[in-house]
Image (spheres, rainbow, N blue to C red):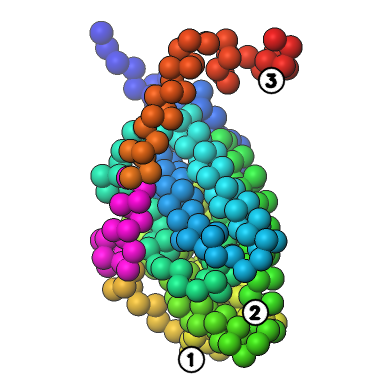
Amino acid sequence: MTTIAPEDTGQEALFDATIAADERIEPRDWMPDDYRASLVRQIAQHAHSEIIGMQPEANWITRAPSLRRKAILMAKVQDEAGHGLYLYSAAETLGTGRDELLDKLHTGRQKYSSIFNYPTLTWADVGAIGWLVDGAAITNQVPLCRCSYGPYARAMVRICKEESFHQRQGYELLLTLSRGTEAQHAMAQDAIDRWWWPSLMMFGPPDDESAHSAQSMAWKIKRHSNDELRQRFVDICVPQAETLGLTLPDPDLRWNEERRHWDFGPIDWTEFREVLKGNGPCNDERIGRRRRAHQEGAWVREAAAAHAAKHPAHTPHAGTDQEEAAR
Ligand code: FAQ
């Protein structure tokens, strides 16, 4: 049997034309293998970040200073689990199951964001994560709502709405601390001092060292480079820090009238690379806890599978919500 190359059937031309016209590629469409693989890589890393990202904040649920703060934090951590679900589902539409991706996470073959390998030492860290980490996530992810792959772009729309609520709760938390007692103000400042630089690293390596950016931008998976988004984030944060009454820990921050952007100091890329290699302050703790949670949850997955086998009509994919309700 002779294999027909995609260029001979017009599939590749159709894919290229769809990208050029800024239209969406959907799961049923033909796509190049490398496009599919790159999406799975990025979406999986993103999904893993959402679920590992639950850990640093969950650390403070039992110690939140009021019932209101505790309820907000619990809702936020639950939202992150939901984001993980949307993203694993988006990866499934590319033919890669959640079990396979989790296995790659647990065996160190796929990454999660460097930021979640730093410890949450004080309550103010919950505010710093909301303001800076969620703020960086939004800056990076709003353009992903226009990603060329439909299911990922649609998942991002919902995620970004929730992330912007997360960002505002962090900002409000820090504002309260900053305007509180001297000790509370100092705690907020200390959190910003520790989270600022790792937040800038979330955007990935500088453009000239970014292995995937050029191809991802040509495919319209990414819409902006790592450095462009990092600069956008700095420009947003400087005036916000001023309103908060807190200082960003960078003596080189200066408004550049010519560029109409804030100049900032050098990032410690050695630290970034070490964290990616597994040598950050909390890498072992985070992945160890994730593996344990997966093992301890095995009985839940087995029970759910056994239930689904006994009652196929009641599995979520068997019918519409209305059909379910009518039963
Ligand atoms: N950490 O060639 P590039 C959140 C890797 S937000 C770890 O530039 P690319 C919300 C990269 O994967 C955080 N690894 O790669 C939340 C690649 O390695 P690979 C998650 C990093 O893909 C808030 C290599 O370096 N958000 O979770 C990092 O073009 C609060 C070369 O890099 C997303 O994932 C890093 N910081 O650009 C949750 C957004 N940076 O794959 C809880 C979607 C780079 O070859 C609480 N992802 N690497 O093994 C993206 O936009 C992109 O993947 C970038 C990297 C921008 C992260």
Give residue 177's mark.
2
Magenta stretch: residue 278 in it?
yes
Secondary structure under the numbered disc 3 in the rendered image: helix
Give the image location of residue 293, x and y in percent.
38, 43
Sequence-wise, which precedes: disc 2 or disc 3?
A: 2
Q: Quadrant of the N terminus?
A: top left
Amino acid, disc 2: Leu
Specify the quadrant of the image occupied by residue 291.
top left
Label placed on residue 321: 3
Magenta range? 274-291
According to the image, label 1 marks what residue? 251
Task: Name the residue rendered at 59%, 48% in the picture.
Answer: 79
Q: In the rendered view, tell whether residue 325 sits above or below residue 263.
A: above
The spot of residue 210 in percent (x, y) is: 36, 60
| Disc 3 from disc 1: Cα separation | 56 Å
Can residue 52 be seen from the camera position used here? yes
Question: Closer to the observer: label 2 or label 3?
Answer: 2
